[in-house]
Image (cartoon, rainbow, N blue to C red):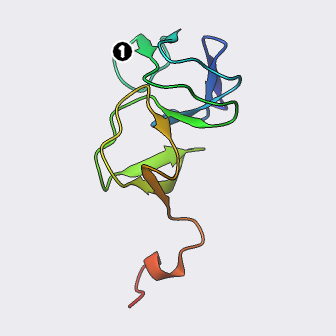
Amino acid sequence: MKGVVLDDAAVLLADDDNVATSIRDLETGRSIASDDFPTDRSVLELAEPIAFGHKLAVASIDAGEPVRKYGEVIGSATERIEPGEWVHTHNCESNRGRGDLAEGSA
């Protein structure tokens, strides 16, 4: 997959991503319908507003689990994130550029 647009609201960039990127400002309660969600759901309801360019969870992500975008791990959830929630610095810690998290670091 090179990206799938979800109901003209967001783009899912890879099959195993658990977040999508909004392609417009999205309001709380907006329903996004798609057969391309990584779970067996076909409709996702937004729990909060998601600004253009921001991430939204398309699957449940437990605290400590990886957040995947572009088919790569971009961070870790710092708390449980439910489908339809905004994913940002308040609930996700970036792993990119973190030498202290590199394999074999002490």
Res. 17 visible in picture: no
Q: Look at mark 1 in the image and give the residue it sits on.
A: 41
Q: In the visual, does 47 lie left or right of 21?
A: left
User: What crowding class fits label 1: few (fewer than 14 Cα within 10 Å), some (14-19), or many (20 or more)?
Assistant: few
Task: Give how far across and how far down residue 39 sits, in percent.
Answer: 36, 24
Res. 20 visible in picture: yes
Task: Give how far across and how far down residue 59 sits, in percent.
Answer: 38, 31
Quarter holding residue 64: bottom left
How many marks the image carries: the answer is: 1
Residue at 28% across, 45% down: 62
Closer-to-camera residue (1/35): 35
Residue at 45% across, 48% down: 67
Quadrant containing the C terminus in the rendered view: bottom left
Closer-to-camera residue (32/35): 32
Question: Considering only vertical position in the picture, is 45 above or below 58?
Answer: above
Task: Give how far across and how far down residue 37 sits, in percent.
Answer: 45, 21
Quarter holding residue 18: top left
Residue at 43% across, 15% down: 45
- Secondary structure beneath dot 1 equals loop
Question: Considering only vertical position in the picture, is 25 above or below 56?
Answer: above
Question: Considering only vertical position in the picture, is 27 above or below 105?
Answer: above
Task: Give how far across and how far down residue 82 sits, in percent.
Answer: 34, 32
Residue at 50% across, 18% down: 28
Q: Amino acid at mark 1?
A: Arg
